[in-house]
Image: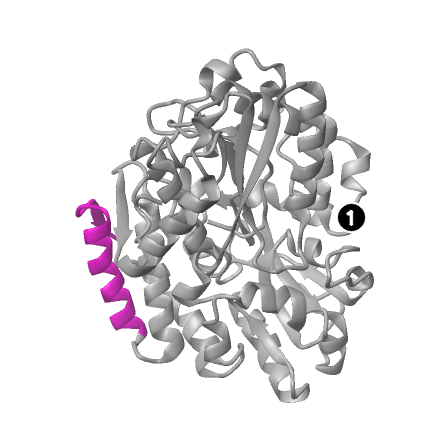
């Protein structure tokens, strides 16, 4: 699922924020602490009405939990909203014991800013006595660990990213069915060939701008940025200096790639690219209907095409090909992926934290975790599941995306990151619309970066 993606996240305008708060208060009733026997679980519900993967999974866990704990009830509190609105609504809920649920679904990039704001409870006392915690891979544990060394969330999977391509469109364009570009230029060359030889389809989609939110930052920009340089140093954050990087050539090169896609009309119309529902449009319309040649996207896409999804597409595995995203010039390690994921966290103001962790333990049995990874087209973060043949053979593409974990990168999920991400989206939007040159967009980012990080910036 996209990264899918904060007290640090810029709030929506005051009017909308007020409306969201009112909605949240209505959804949460009298607060999580109103009954010691009722567990309130809040999660992000897909804006695509046909995709109910999370809803179905949680409904099953609710049944298991209520059977295991007689007299206890689970109230599911879905938040149906695009990513940025979900974050805002969630933060509104976390601020008060009257509205805080007992358990919340947190994007790994959001978690540190919410920890800094005091919204979440450290889980170490629970994790120390939970045998299954030893099964979780180290990188997944790190994603939910704060700068204070404590862990605030239990990951429910990770993801990787690559290039999806339509074999039928490629054949018409004279491109190979086993396509594997070695450089950015080869990716753009394929998109240009599609534009020239296959009219009526969109050659390539790369998410961009603020409406796409973290999908623009992570699925597109960071997939480009982390493919610049030598692959051994983080191009966004200097860990040794503990400062954010400004003025880099790699940043400008990544912006120029985005500019090229939209300037040459290789991507969707700009109005469509800046539609907040562009992710749903890509997965539910463009790809399954043969309208898109190449999609720079995530491992989770097949969840939109499974039986009962509303966008059933049983032929996807034969009609689509997969390629890894190359580095800029083909330099080592040759391929790039970004990984994120979501966690289950307990609010600091939760009324029933012990019961909430019991719900996590129920969700995260080996059997339930495997069920979730497969249903969600996710990548396993439990060693015992990752080794299980029933997982590795469950769905086409799982091995391809799981193998990318060895060359993947993780966002520098420090408290300032959500603001940094928004600044990246603004720079992307400027070159997408043509309102800003690459140099002006990069300069604007550098200025915004100083404000977002209290001037904790180093020039590269």
Q: Residue furthest left?
A: 455
Mark 1 — residue? 395
Please say if 312 is above or below 410.
Answer: below
**446 drawn magenta:** yes
Q: Is residue 364 visible?
A: no
Q: Secondary structure at mark 1?
A: loop
What secondary structure prevails in the magenta region? helix
Relative to the observer, which residue lies in front, 117 or 263? 117
The part of the chain drawn in magenta is 438-460
Relative to the observer, which residue lies in front, 181 or 280? 280
**342 drawn magenta:** no
Name which residue lies at 23% across and 65% down.
443
Residue 163 coordinates in the image, percent (x, y): 62, 61
Residue 422 coordinates in the image, percent (x, y): 34, 57
Please say if 82 is above or below 140.
Answer: below
Left or right of 289, for residue 267: left
Left or right of 22, for residue 344: right
Relative to the observer, which residue lies in front, 329 or 244? 244
Please say if 93 is above or below 201.
Answer: above
Residue 379 coordinates in the image, percent (x, y): 65, 41
Q: Is residue 149 visible?
A: yes
Residue 350 coordinates in the image, percent (x, y): 43, 27
């Amino acid at each position: 699922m996209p990264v899918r993606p904060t007290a640090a996240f810029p709030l929506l305008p005051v009017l909308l924020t007020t409306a969201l708060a009112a909605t949240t208060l209505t959804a949460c009733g009298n607060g999580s602490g109103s009954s010691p026997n009722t567990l309130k679980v809040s999660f992000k519900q897909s804006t695509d009405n046909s995709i109910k993967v999370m809803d179905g999974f949680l409904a099953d866990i609710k049944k298991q939990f209520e059977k295991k704990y007689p007299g206890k009830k689970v109230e599911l509190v879905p938040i149906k909203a695009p990513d940025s609105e979900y974050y805002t609504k969630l933060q509104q809920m976390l601020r008060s014991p009257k509205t805080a649920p007992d358990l919340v679904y947190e994007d790994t990039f959001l978690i540190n800013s919410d920890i800094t704001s005091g919204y979440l409870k450290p889980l170490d006392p629970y994790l120390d006595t939970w045998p299954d915690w030893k099964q979780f891979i180290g990188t997944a544990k790190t994603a939910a660990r704060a700068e204070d060394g404590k862990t605030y969330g239990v990951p429910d999977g990770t993801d990787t990213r690559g290039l999806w391509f339509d074999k039928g469109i490629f054949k018409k364009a004279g491109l190979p069915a086993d396509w594997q570009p070695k450089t950015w230029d080869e990716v753009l060359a394929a998109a240009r060939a599609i534009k020239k030889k296959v009219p009526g389809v969109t050659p390539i989609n790369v998410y961009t701008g603020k409406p796409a939110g973290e999908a623009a930052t992570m699925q597109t920009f960071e997939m480009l940025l982390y493919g610049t340089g030598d692959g051994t140093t983080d191009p966004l954050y200097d860990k040794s200096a503990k400062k954010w990087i400004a003025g880099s050539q790699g940043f400008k090169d990544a912006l120029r790639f985005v500019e090229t896609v939209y300037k040459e009309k290789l991507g969707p119309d700009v109005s469509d690219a800046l539609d907040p529902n562009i992710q749903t449009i890509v997965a539910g319309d463009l790809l399954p209907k043969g309208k898109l040649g190449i999609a720079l996207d995530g491992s989770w896409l097949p969840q939109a095409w499974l039986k009962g999804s509303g966008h059933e597409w049983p032929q996807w595995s034969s009609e689509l090909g997969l390629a890894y995203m190359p580095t800029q010039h083909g330099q080592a390690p040759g391929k790039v992926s970004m990984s994120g994921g979501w966690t289950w966290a307990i609010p600091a103001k939760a009324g029933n934290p012990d019961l909430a962790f019991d719900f996590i333990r129920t969700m995260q049995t080996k059997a339930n975790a495997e069920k979730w990874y497969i249903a969600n087209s996710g990548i396993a973060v439990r060693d015992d599941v990752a080794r299980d043949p029933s997982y590795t053979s469950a769905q086409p593409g799982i091995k391809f995306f799981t193998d990318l974990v060895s060359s993947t990168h993780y966002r520098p999920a420090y408290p300032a990151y959500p603001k940094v991400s928004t600044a990246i989206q603004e720079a992307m939007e400027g070159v997408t619309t043509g309102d800003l040159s690459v140099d002006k967009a990069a300069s604007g980012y550098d200025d915004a970066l100083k404000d977002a990080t209290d001037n904790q910036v180093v020039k590269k």
